[in-house]
Image (tube, helix red, strand yellow):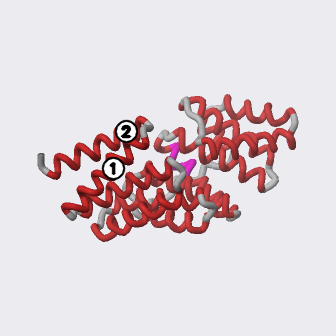
C-alpha cells in the first residue's frame, strides 16, 4: 500500500469518526495520518491533519491545545498559499480566542479570515456573524450592529436561516444593552421563527445568552413581550426584517 493510500484511509476514517462523535478513535486516526505526513514531508497533508486535530481538541474544549494546532496549521497553509484552507483555520482560531474570552484577538483572526473569503458568500456570512458576536462581547456596540446588519442581508440573499437566527439572537441582546426592549422582543421573535423553520437550536453557549436576554426583555415589557415576539414570528420574513430595522443593503465583497 502506497503512503498516499494509507494517508487517505487514515484521514478518511478519522473524519468519519469525528462526524460520529467518537473522538478517541478520530484522534488516533488523525494522529497516525499526521505522523505519516511528517514521515513523507508532505506539508499539505501535515497542515490538513493539524487543522483536523485542532477541531477535535476544540470539541473536547481543550482550547490551549486546539489553538496551538490551528496556529501551526495556519502557518503551513499561509506558506503553501492555500487561502481557502487558511481562512477556515483563522476562523477556528477566532472561535477559540472567543471561547477563551480574548475577544480582541478573536476579532483580529476573523477579520483576516473574512478577507480571504470574498468568493465564498456562505463563509462571508458566518465570519460576518462572528465579527458581530465578538464585537458585541467586547462591548463595541456600533461595530457589532454594523456586522450583524451585514449578516442579515447576506443570509436573506442566501436563504441561510441558521446563521440569520444567530445574528438576530445577538441583535436582540444588543437591543437590550441599548435600552430598546420592544425592538429586542421583535427581533427575538424573528430569530425563533427562523430556528423553528430550520428545525434547529442555537449552540448551548449561544442559547443560554439568548434565553437570558429574552427573560430580561420579558421582565421589562411584561405582556408586551409575548405580543411583540409572536407578531414577529407570524410576519413574512423580509417584511419583519424591515420593520425590525435590521435589513441593510448587502455589502460589497471585501
Report the front residue among 83 and 175.
83
Query: Which residue is depicted at the point 47% across and 52% down?
Result: 57
Where residue 30 is drawn, which disc sits there? 1
Report the front residue among 134 and 168.
134
Q: Quadrant of the C terminus?
A: bottom left
Report the front residue among 33 and 113.
33
Q: Which residue is mark 2?
A: 17
Query: Which residue is depicted at the point 82% across and 39% down?
Result: 218
User: Is residue 252 something one can see in this rendering?
Assistant: no
Q: Residue furthest left?
A: 1
Hey, which quadrant is residue 193 in on the image?
top right
Residue 233 falls left or right of residue 11: right
167 in the magenta segment: no
What SS does tag 2 mark? helix
Q: Is residue 87 above or below residue 15?
A: below
**First in residue order: circle 2 vs circle 1:** 2
152 in the magenta segment: yes
Residue 69 falls left or right of residue 47: right
Query: Which residue is depicted at the point 56% across and 68% down?
Result: 105
Q: Is residue 83 above or below residue 205?
A: below
* Residue 174 spot, x, y in % from top left: 72, 53
What SS does tag 1 mark? helix
The magenta span reads 151-156
Crowd band around label 2 with a 10 angstrom C-alpha radius: few (<14), some (14–19), many (20+) = some
Real-space Cα separation, disc 2 to disc 1, in angstroms: 10 Å
Residue 203 falls left or right of residue 74: right
Amino acid at each position: 500500500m502506497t503512503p498516499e493510500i494509507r494517508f487517505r484511509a487514515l484521514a478518511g476514517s478519522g473524519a468519519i469518526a469525528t462526524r460520529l462523535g467518537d473522538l478517541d478513535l478520530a484522534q488516533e486516526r488523525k494522529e497516525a495520518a499526521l505522523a505519516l505526513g511528517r514521515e513523507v514531508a508532505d506539508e499539505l497533508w501535515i497542515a490538513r491533519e493539524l487543522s483536523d486535530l485542532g477541531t477535535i481538541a476544540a470539541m473536547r474544549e481543550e482550547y490551549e491545545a486546539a489553538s496551538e494546532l490551528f496556529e501551526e496549521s495556519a502557518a503551513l497553509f499561509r506558506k503553501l498559499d492555500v487561502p481557502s484552507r487558511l481562512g477556515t483555520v483563522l476562523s477556528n482560531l477566532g472561535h477559540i480566542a472567543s471561547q477563551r474570552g480574548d475577544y480582541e484577538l478573536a476579532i483580529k483572526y476573523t477579520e483576516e479570515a473574512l478577507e480571504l473569503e470574498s468568493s465564498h458568500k456562505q463563509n462571508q456570512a458566518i465570519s460576518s456573524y462572528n465579527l458581530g458576536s465578538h464585537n458585541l462581547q467586547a462591548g463595541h456596540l456600533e461595530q457589532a450592529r454594523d456586522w450583524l446588519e451585514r449578516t442579515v442581508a447576506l443570509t436573506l440573499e442566501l436563504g441561510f436561516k441558521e446563521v440569520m437566527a444567530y445574528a438576530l439572537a445577538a441583535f436582540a441582546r444588543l437591543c437590550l444593552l441599548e435600552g430598546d426592549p420592544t425592538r429586542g422582543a421583535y427581533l427575538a421573535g424573528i430569530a425563533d421563527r427562523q430556528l423553528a423553520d430550520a428545525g434547529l437550536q442555537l449552540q448551548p453557549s449561544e442559547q443560554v445568552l439568548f434565553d437570558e436576554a429574552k427573560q430580561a426583555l420579558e421582565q421589562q415589557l411584561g405582556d408586551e413581550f409575548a405580543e411583540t415576539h409572536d407578531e414577529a414570528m407570524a410576519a413574512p420574513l423580509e417584511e419583519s426584517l424591515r420593520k425590525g430595522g435590521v435589513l441593510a443593503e448587502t455589502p460589497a465583497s471585501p
